[in-house]
Amino acid sequence: MKYIFVLWTTLIWALFAALFVLQSYFFSIAIGQSFDLWLRLSFEGSQALIWAILTPVVVSFAKRWNLHGASAPASLSVHFVLGFVIGYIHRAASFWFYIALYPPDTPLPSSVAWAKILGSTMNSVLIYWCIVAVAYVVHFVRAHQQERLQAAHLESLFQQSRLESLRRQIQPHFLFNTLHSISALMDDDVPGARRMITRLSDLLRKTLDQSERSKIPLGEEIRFIADYLAIESVRFQDRLQVRYEVAPEVEKALVPSLILQPLVENAIRHGVAHVASPSVIIIRALRNEENLNITILNTSVPVNELEKGIGLKNTESRLQLAYGERAALKILTIQDQFSVTIEIPYEDRA
């Protein structure tokens, strides 16, 4: 970082020297005077070189004596003194450097030389203040950027914490509902209840495997849903039918883990469980340009269809936290079909 600062400082002062040389050239042409390129390069180059050497010193002064806070008045006084000191040093070094390159025909009295130096010091004092001002601007811009980065990092941690909290709410909710289903089978279908317990054990094992990942491939999420529906099929038997319409090319797309389970559970709990006739749940996924659309369609319109339960509210909150306005959850009822569609940005597994 230090070498980059020195490099940029040297380049900037070299650019200023070149601009002043160019300005002198056009001025000489305008008034019809001859232009001595080497003389002008020596003069402007020497001043720029000395400023390139002094700039790191001035910047260190700006950092040491801040012009904000309670110490601002004292720092301002210090900078007034330092401005004249640095300005005088610059003019003296530039003057004697130029004299060394182009000695006058007659010796220049010391009193005249120092008078010339003192008389032109104010220009260098103004440049000192310009450097201090630029140093403060750069400092405040960097401090503001650092604050924004820290705020963004804290916000990211907060959002991750909320997402994790929402995701963990699913597990006890899902477990409670599944145990309730097992309890309902115990009196009428003990073998079926045992099969549900076995499959529940396998499903919980997969849930633990996914707990460390915030996003998983859609294909893996679909297989998890298939295992969950296998448990529910023991309970509902012929009343529950499932159809998958998932394009093979979207199976590698990344989705939030356990994002579909609350939607499928919602379809069963508020739809299939309340009708005696067979119901079909269709799980559909396809890519729509830069988005991934996943639809859970249920041929049984749920009771209280306009009321969002914990599953839908949880899913909607997770989508908003993970994707913001780029995600959407849409609920649609057409005749005897009820569907929930989530739309998220398409992210490839690769």
Image (cartoon, grey):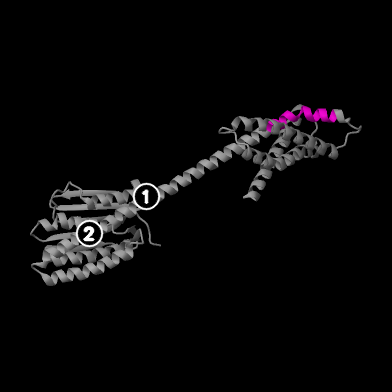
Estimate how packed mark 1 is, as few (under 14), some (14 to 19) or many (20 or more) residues with alpha carbons within 10 Å.
some
Q: Which mark is residue 205?
A: none
Write the residue at 58% across / 40% down. Answer: 138
Quadrant in the picture for residue 237:
bottom left
Q: Give SS at disc 1.
A: helix
Where does label 2 land, which residue? 174
Q: Which amino acid, mark 1?
A: Gln
Q: Which amino acid, mark 2?
A: Phe
- Residue 8 image point, x, y percent: 65, 45
Q: Is residue 55 left or right of residue 196?
A: right
Cβ–Cβ below 8 Å for labels 2 and 1? Answer: no
Cα gap from disc 2 to disc 1, whole angstroms: 23 Å
Using the rendered image of the protein, determine whether residue 298 is visible from the camera's viewpoint: no
Where does label 1 land, which residue? 159
- Residue 41 image point, x, y percent: 77, 39
- Give the main secondary structure, helix, strand or loop, of the magenta stretch: helix
- Residue 162 image point, x, y percent: 34, 51
Disc nearer the start of the sequence (2/1): 1
Rendered view: 99 above or below 254: above
Q: Nearer the viewer, residue 39 or 6?
A: 6
Q: Is residue 75 left or right of residue 214?
A: right
| Magenta segment boundaries in residue numbering | 112-127
Rendered view: 87 above or below 219: above
Using the rendered image of the protein, determine whether residue 332 is visible from the camera's viewpoint: yes
